[in-house]
Amino acid sequence: MSLAVTRMILRRPQVGRMTLRHASTTTEAASAKAKETAGSAASSASQGLSKVTSTAGSALSSAGSALNSIGGRTGKLIGFVQSLVPPTVYYSKVGLELGKLVFHGQKMSPPNMATFQQYGQNILNAVKNPSAAGASNPFQSLSKLRSMDTQQLATAGVVVAEVVGFFTVGEMLGRFKVIGYRSSATAHH
């Protein structure tokens, strides 16, 4: 039954044209701006982006046309989300292409498998034998802390401050408030 409904909706000329027109105008405008700013240095990237925009427009128009027949608040929400999908897909592809250009321009390479195995083996050994990592004897940890120079202590302090800061910001975002949680208990002063 859903196949017949999908075919019926796809055969309606105004629905398919509206979705395709919206997706293509959004992607064409963004593609023109990207080509304008990229210049001659990113000609290969603009060719890749034009391929992406052409495939994204057709895929989105065929997938999203079935949802256009829903009305009410749900239809508005679906319409809003559909309007966000083409630019999101486009700019994620732009970011990927830019990342590739930077990756190749800086001559970066991912670590080899031996590096992954070495770090994995160190973590596995620390889990299997925690006494070797210094967790069993607090005096060893204290002596390591005392032997650190001021630059290492400052670096450790900055890392701790970053972790606490990110945790605090995450808590604020999660609560949607800057201060405290709501409580049903009465305040005692």
Image (cartoon, rainbow, N blue to C red):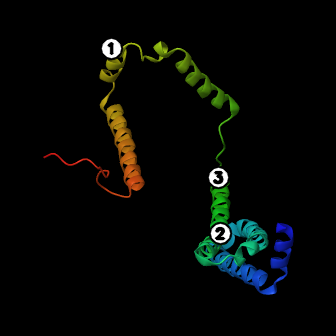
Marks 2 and 3 in Cβ contact (< 8 Å): no
Q: Residue at x 67, y 71 (%)?
A: 86
Place of residue 50 in the rendered image (x, y in percent of width and height, measured from the top left): 75, 71
- Mark nearest the camera among 1 and 2 is 2
Q: Earlier in the sequence, mark 2 or mark 3?
A: 2
* Secondary element type, mark 1: helix
Label 3 vs 1, first from the N-terminus = 3
Work out which quarter of the rendered image holds the N terminus and state it.
bottom right
In the rendered image, the vertical position of residue 54 relative to residue 179, given as above or below: below
Q: Percent position (x, y) of residue 4?
A: 86, 72
Which residue: 72% across, 78% down? 69
Residue 107 located left or right of residue 122: right
> Which residue bears the numbered disc 1?
139
Q: Nearer the viewer, residue 83 or 130?
A: 83
Q: Residue at x 42, y 18 (%)?
A: 135
Distance between the alpha carbons at the discs numbered 1 and 2: 56 Å
* Residue 159 numbered tag: none
Residue tagged 2: 85
Tell me where residue 26 appears, x and y as whole percent: 66, 78
Element type where label 3 sits in the image:
helix
The three-letter code of the residue at mark 2 reads: Val
The quarter of the displayed image where residue 29 is located: bottom right
Horizontal placement of 184 versus 38: left or right?
Answer: left
Mark 3 sits on what residue? Answer: 103
Disc 1 residue type? Phe
- Residue toward you, 69 or 186: 186
